[in-house]
Amino acid sequence: MIIFDKVIKDYNGNTNYRALDEISLEIKDGEFVSIIGPSGAGKSTFIKMLIREEAPTGGRVLIDNLNVAELEDGQIPVLRRKIGTIFQDFKLLSNKTAHENVAFALEVIGMSRKQIESDVPKVLRIVGMEDRAVNFPHQLSGGEKQRIAIARALIHRPKILLADEPTGNLDMLNTFDVIKLLTKINEFGTTVILASHNREVVNAVGKRVVTLDRGKIVKDQEQGKYSI
């Protein structure tokens, strides 16, 4: 369970720039929730709160009853192992192959080479990229790069998957391929939080939508499932 309890975020102590303004909501385990709104609405700040890249000015962010803002520095990596994050610009390492990019996420947490060599092909198969394992990022299309980024986010079996504008650099065909993939991951039981300004993308998901505007929740609605 994720809980935002009257969360406020001011930048540089400036209450005139309030990125989040008393946000309160709950996200249940296994939900797919889209956070939508225009640029500057607070979507990215919302995502950053969950991985403790930002701390609230006021209020609480709870993940499984753990107050994220109260974590000590040594506890933050443990939190982030529960969470996979996907970005608009992929953030792949240019000097590593697709396989090596995914494997690196396990190397940094000290996973054994045997486990890495067992797990990486499995997750590449899930995202449909097993035949591109030896390719470098410059040899991949935008959609393929995002699939590798998703594989990297999934490799440590996160409980929560955060997707911050994951289709912003993709054409419509690749956009809907990524959305179908995120929906499939959610069906496996992973909580998915998608931040997007693209209503067409969010409508295609067909799940719960939380609309932000100027740091406030202006709408929180359930939607019926939509088949892409």
Image (cartoon, helix red, strand yellow):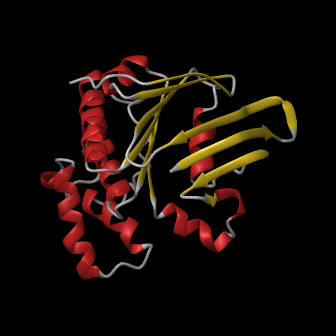
Residues 130 and 51: in front is: 51
| Residue 30, placed above or below residue 83 | above
List the single residue furthest toward the top: 200
Residues 136 and 49: in front is: 49
Residues 133 and 18: in front is: 18
Total numbered badges shown on the rendered structure:
0
Instruction: Tell me if I can see residue 68 in this picture.
Output: yes
Query: Residue at position x 26%, y 44% from top?
Result: 187
Query: Residue at position x 38%, y 74% from top?
Result: 107
Q: Quadrant of the C terminus?
A: top left
- Residue 118 at what x, y percent from top left? 19, 72
Query: Residue at position x 67%, y 70% from top?
Result: 73
List the single residue furthest toward the left: 131
- Residue 91 at what x, y percent from top left? 44, 49
- Residue 72 at what x, y percent from top left? 69, 70
- The quarter holding residue 105 reads bottom left
- Residue 153 at what x, y percent from top left? 38, 55
Judge from the rendering whether residue 58 lies leftward or rightward of residue 35; answer left or right.
right
Judge from the rendering whether residue 31 lies leftward or rightward of residue 219; answer left or right.
left
Instruction: Tell me if I can see residue 141 in this picture.
Output: no
Query: Residue at position x 86%, y 32% from top?
Result: 15
| Residue 149, placed above or below residue 64 | above
